[in-house]
Image (cartoon, rainbow, N blue to C red):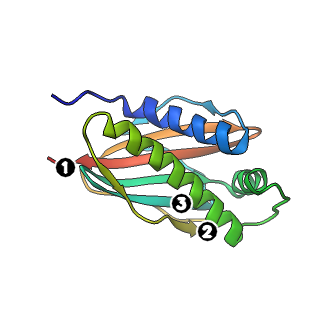
Amino acid sequence: MKESLDVGSEIVAGCKDVFSTMLMVELEAEEVVIQKKVAIKSNITSMIGLGGGLKGLLAVHCPALVATEITGTFLGMDVEEIDDDVKDAIGEIANMIAGNLKISFAKTDTKIELAIPTSIVGDSFYVSGIADSTRIVVPFRMGEGKFWVELMYIMNT
């Protein structure tokens, strides 16, 4: 029998691990939101497609100021606008968070395959996933800014 997994807690733990290890930044997680509409103010979203025993999408949504702060910390330089470095950095953060989630699901004998990160930049866009999927959103606070990690998924049987 497969072990049960608290996916929201795994997202929180994975994000905190990525940020403390790679950026030396401590995150504050807010309440995990499941299956509710959440207002997300984002100028960049980096997404990773998920396949295998779980299909869906993991997304990291950031306002411009948070995305440039993350990138500047990650690369050790000042970043003032969303450019290719920011798209790559936020994509890599999404990839590492998805990788941690992959490890967590492996403990339940669920194998996940990860796609290459895709980033969307703009002032007004909507990300939708698979119909009837489970949706989990975790808001995080970093310094003065806030960003969101979202997972939309369906378990394959």
- Asked if labels 3 and 1 touch by Cβ distance under 8 angstroms, the answer is no
Measure how far apart labels 2 and 3 are at the Cα level.
Answer: 12 Å
- The spot of residue 140 in percent (x, y) is 61, 37
Q: Name the image quarter holding residue 34.
A: top left
| Label 1 vs label 3, nearer the camera | 1
3 w.r.t. 55: above or below: above
- The spot of residue 120 in percent (x, y) is 55, 68
98 w.r.t. 119: above or below: above
Give the residue number, with chain letter if any, for mark 3: 46
- Asked if labels 3 and 2 touch by Cβ distance under 8 angstroms, the answer is no
Q: Is residue 60 visible?
A: no
- The spot of residue 109 in percent (x, y) is 25, 38
Please tell me how crowded label 3 is: few (under 14), some (14-19), or many (20+) other residues with Cα within 10 Å: many
**Left or right position of 134 against 97:** left
- Asked if labels 2 and 1 touch by Cβ distance under 8 angstroms, the answer is no
**Left or right position of 133 against 138:** left
**Secondary structure category for the residue under label 1:** loop
**Secondary structure category for the residue under label 3:** strand
Q: Earlier in the sequence, mark 1 or mark 2?
A: 2
**Left or right position of 85 against 111:** right
Q: The N terminus appears in which quarter of the rendering?
A: top left
Residue drawn at 71 percent across, 58 percent down: 64
Residue drawn at 65 percent across, 60 percent down: 89
- The spot of residue 119 in percent (x, y) is 54, 66
Give the residue number, with chain letter if any, for mark 1: 156
